[in-house]
């Protein structure tokens, strides 16, 4: 009996070792893969995109092109992948480009990807995608946008942590430029998102975007503007009712993040004694207090507790940045600026957009269930009627060093 048990244990261990050391589960060698680093999706627009029948669009039997109004021409899917031969230094003749970018047209993402396989000598692999870019026209088409997001969510190779951005114009244009600082486009975009030395764009990964749109019908996504040899990721794109609603400015996006307790290192410039003083925000903590007053109205008080450094003032003989009165002047000026920006963006989302992008409703549901019971059936309307008061408490920790 013991010998049979030992044999069974040995077989299980052997099988485990074999499975754990297997290197190619899908029988595709690594050198036969095309590692996609950037994925761009646009709405097909007749007269502006490649003609029907080209780049993967279906052709008639005799080879003539289909008319542009063909229902099959719905999406333009573009990918960028590294030139592995150049990076490895293999081959006597190899393209000098560090990356390749190609586009195709199709009725949906899945068929477009299959069409790439008729033109590329490798198997498309999305496991290393660094960024997903959505074109402006696509985001303005509710039905098409929902189809694309559903298709991306079903693609098991794409991580839910991939960064997503909306491109002002066509998303594919972002993949075909040659950046000055980083030849691999997908990696370039990822590094911009990761540095977080600014609060002027709102980093959102794919999982958060899909969850927000599914639950609330809206989300704020980063805006990407394509230059000749560089990108500018700043500001945001507001999606409401599952489609594009408005572009948001850089300062509006920064204020949104302050109210959501998210902020990268950033500089707030305030006027003190006629001088523009740069204040570096290093730490931020947001607190929320919610209660119902005697009249039955729901009130929200948001408190921003911040710390930072004075980065500059003015060169003068009698300059004394350690003066307590001066430091308090800077603190009060920064508080007023932060409150003004946050109040402005809160008012805009309550009255113009009527969208709770901060999850205030979820906070009430979790921590004030007795209030939530009264507003859960018409939260959108209740959000617009919410009485919001915003205050800030800023502390200067350092005044800088002069060499």
Image (cartoon, rainbow, N blue to C red):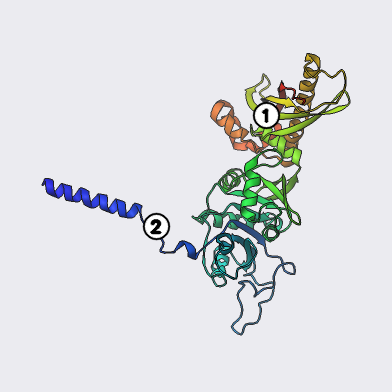
Q: Which residue is mark 2?
A: 23
Q: Is residue 147 left or right of residue 181?
A: left
Q: Is residue 354 visible?
A: yes
Q: Is residue 218 visible?
A: no
Q: Dividing the image into 4 quarters, which one contains the C terminus?
A: top right
Residue 344 point in image, percent of width and height: 77, 33
Q: Report crowding for label 1: few under 14, some 14 to 19, many 20 or more residues within 10 A (C-alpha).
A: some
Q: Which residue is mark 1?
A: 282
Instruction: Name which residue lies at 68% across and 38% down.
Output: 197
Determine whether 181 is above or below 361 in the image.
below
* Farthest top residue in view: 324
N-term mark: 2 or 1: 2
Q: Quadrant of residue 24?
A: bottom left
Closer-to-camera residue (364/59): 59
Closer-to-camera residue (241/213): 213
Cα–Cα gap, marks 2 and 1: 45 Å
* Farthest left residue in view: 1
Determine whether 389 is above or below 211 in the image.
above
Determine whether 275 is above or below 17 in the image.
above
Q: Quadrant of residue 84?
A: bottom right
Residue 301 point in image, percent of width and height: 67, 24
Instruction: Name which residue lies at 58% across and 52% down.
Output: 130
Question: In the drawing, what numbered circle is on residue 354?
Answer: none
Instruction: Name which residue lies at 68% across and 40% down.
Output: 355
Tag 2's secondary structure? Answer: loop
Instruction: Name which residue lies at 60% across and 34% down.
Output: 361
Residue 138 point in image, percent of width and height: 67, 57
Question: Number of numbered discs present?
Answer: 2
Tag 1's secondary structure? Answer: strand
């Amino acid at each position: 009996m013991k010998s049979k048990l030992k044999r069974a244990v040995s077989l299980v261990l052997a099988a485990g070792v074999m499975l754990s050391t297997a290197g190619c589960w899908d029988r595709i060698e690594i050198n036969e893969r095309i590692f996609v680093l950037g994925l761009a999706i646009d709405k097909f627009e007749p007269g502006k995109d490649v003609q029907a029948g080209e780049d993967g669009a279906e052709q008639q039997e005799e080879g003539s092109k289909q008319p542009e109004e063909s229902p099959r021409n719905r999406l333009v899917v573009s990918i960028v992948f590294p030139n592995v031969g150049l990076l490895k230094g293999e081959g006597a003749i190899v393209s000098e480009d560090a990356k390749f970018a190609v586009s195709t047209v199709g009725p949906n993402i899945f068929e477009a990807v299959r069409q790439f396989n008729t033109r590329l000598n490798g198997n498309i692999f999305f496991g290393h995608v660094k960024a997903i870019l959505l074109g402006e026209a696509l985001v303005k088409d509710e039905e098409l946008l929902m189809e694309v997001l559903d298709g991306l969510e079903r693609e098991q190779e794409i991580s839910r942590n991939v960064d997503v951005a909306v491109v002002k114009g066509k998303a594919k244009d972002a993949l075909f430029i040659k950046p000055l600082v980083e030849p691999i486009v997908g990696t370039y975009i990822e590094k911009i998102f990761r540095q977080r030395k600014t609060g002027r764009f709102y980093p959102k990964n794919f999982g958060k975007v899909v969850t927000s749109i599914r639950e609330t019908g809206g989300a704020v996504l980063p805006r990407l503007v394509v230059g000749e040899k560089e990108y500018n990721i700043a500001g945001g794109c507001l999606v409401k009712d599952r489609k594009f609603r408005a572009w948001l400015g850089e300062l509006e996006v920064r204020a949104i993040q302050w109210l959501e307790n998210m902020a990268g290192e950033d500089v707030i410039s305030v006027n003190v004694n006629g001088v523009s003083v740069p204040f570096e925000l290093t730490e931020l903590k947001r607190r929320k207090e919610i209660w119902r007053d005697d009249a039955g109205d729901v009130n929200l008080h948001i408190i921003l507790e911040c710390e930072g450094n004075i980065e500059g003032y003015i060169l003068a003989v009698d300059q004394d940045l350690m003066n307590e009165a001066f430091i308090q002047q800077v603190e009060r000026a920064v508080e007023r600026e932060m409150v003004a920006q946050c109040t402005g963006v809160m008012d805009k989302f309550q009255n113009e957009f009527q969208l709770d992008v901060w999850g205030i409703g979820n906070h009430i549901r979790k921590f004030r269930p007795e209030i939530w019971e009264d507003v859960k059936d018409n939260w959108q309307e209740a959000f617009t009627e919410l009485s919001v008061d915003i205050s800030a408490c800023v502390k200067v920790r350092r005044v800088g060093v002069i060499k």
